[in-house]
Image (spheres, rainbow, N blue to C red):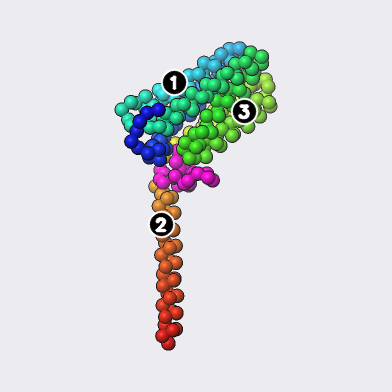
């Protein structure tokens, strides 16, 4: 989409160092407002609030990014392919309305289910971009819990479903706020199949350094043991 002299690996590391909490905070705020309005508004007006609210998450996230240090609209920083991919993934969430609106016209109470699940699918490619489990966990839990809540509380779908999503956003923000979504208080945050990109965190641990150090120590110990064994064999032969 644009030219850059940095490799994709370098750009991914830059992307992973960002905090990436502006959009989740925006989603949390909007879905919280939707849930509160759902307590007082009839279905038609609650649906209108959901349409307006979810459509404004991206704009609210861009505004919040000014205070989280992400600065989505800052054109002075180096261009990054993964930033562009992030916005493409974000735009694909809008395609959910092509399914949500027809079902809403037939069954108005289906709106929290369709928008809640389909808009959450953007979290799955985020896991690949970040090489981190948070997107898969959030997307998977969101699909299951939203569907369960929608079926279990048919009379309060515009209340329960938004609050379920709010809870998942809180979980995602807590996980992502530690060192740019890379580690959580000294514990590795990579998942099977993803390289361990957790190089540092707020508690000062360096897991990659620990792993490299332990590997080197094991190699040194092996070399020393081999040398001792060779020396013993030499002494026996000389005797």
Along the line of sight, the residue nearer the viewer: 223 or 167? 223
Q: Is residue 156 above or below residue 211?
A: above
Q: Is residue 141 visible?
A: yes
Q: Which mark is residue 59?
A: 1
Closer to the camera, 197 or 234? Answer: 234
Percent of width and height locating residue 85:
45, 30
Residue plotted at (38% across, 32% down): 80
Q: Earlier in the sequence, mark 3 or mark 1?
A: 1
Specify the segment rendered in magenta. 181-202
The correct choice, above or below, for 57 with respect to 205 in the image is above
**Percent coordinates x, y for residue 180 in the rendering:** 42, 37
**Quadrant assignment for the C terminus:** bottom left
Give whichever of 234, 158 is nearer the camera. Answer: 234
Q: Where does residue 147 sit, x and y in percent of width and height?
A: 64, 28
Which comes sooner in the sequence, label 1 or label 2? 1
Quadrant of residue 8 within the rendered picture: top left
User: Residue 180: in sight, yes or no?
Assistant: no
Dot 3, crowdedness within 10 Å: few (<14), some or many (≥20)?
Answer: many
Q: Are marks 1 and 2 in contact (CB under 8 Å)?
A: no
SS assignment at label 2: helix
- Please state if 117 lies on the left or on the right of 174 as rendered: right
Residue 179 sits above or below residue 233 on the image: above
Q: Main secondary structure of the magenta part?
A: loop
- Position of residue 153 relative to residue 108, above or below, is below
In the rendered image, residue 200 lying in the magenta stretch gets the answer yes
CA gap, disc 3 to disc 1?
Answer: 24 Å
The dot on residue 213 is 2
At 59% from the left and 34% from the top, the residue drawn is 140
Element under label 1? Answer: helix
Image depth: mark 2 or mark 3 in front: 2
Q: Which residue is mark 3?
A: 146
């Amino acid at each position: 989409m644009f030219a850059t002299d940095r490799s994709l690996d370098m750009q991914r590391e830059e992307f992973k160092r960002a905090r990436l909490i502006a959009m989740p905070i925006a989603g949390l705020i909007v879905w919280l407002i939707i849930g509160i309005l759902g307590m007082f508004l009839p279905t038609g007006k609650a649906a209108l609030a959901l349409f307006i609210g979810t459509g404004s998450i991206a704009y609210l996230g861009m505004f919040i990014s000014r205070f989280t240090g992400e600065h989505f609209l800052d054109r002075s920083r180096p261009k990054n392919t993964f930033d562009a991919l992030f916005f493409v993934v974000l735009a694909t969430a809008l395609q959910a309305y092509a399914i949500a609106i027809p079902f809403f016209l037939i069954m108005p109470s289906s709106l929290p289910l369709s928008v809640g699940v389909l808009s959450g699918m953007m979290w799955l490619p985020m896991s690949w971009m970040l090489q981190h489990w948070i997107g898969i966990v959030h997307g998977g839990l969101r699909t299951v819990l939203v569907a369960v809540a929608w079926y279990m509380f048919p009379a309060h779908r515009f209340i329960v479903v938004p609050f379920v999503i709010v809870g998942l956003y809180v979980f995602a923000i807590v996980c992502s706020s530690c060192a740019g979504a890379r580690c959580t208080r000294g514990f590795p945050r990579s998942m099977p199949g993803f390289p361990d990109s957790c190089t540092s965190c707020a508690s000062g641990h360096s897991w990659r350094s620990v792993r490299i150090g332990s590997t080197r120590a094991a190699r040194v110990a092996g070399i020393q043991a081999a040398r001792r064994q060779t020396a013993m064999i030499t002494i026996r032969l000389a005797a």
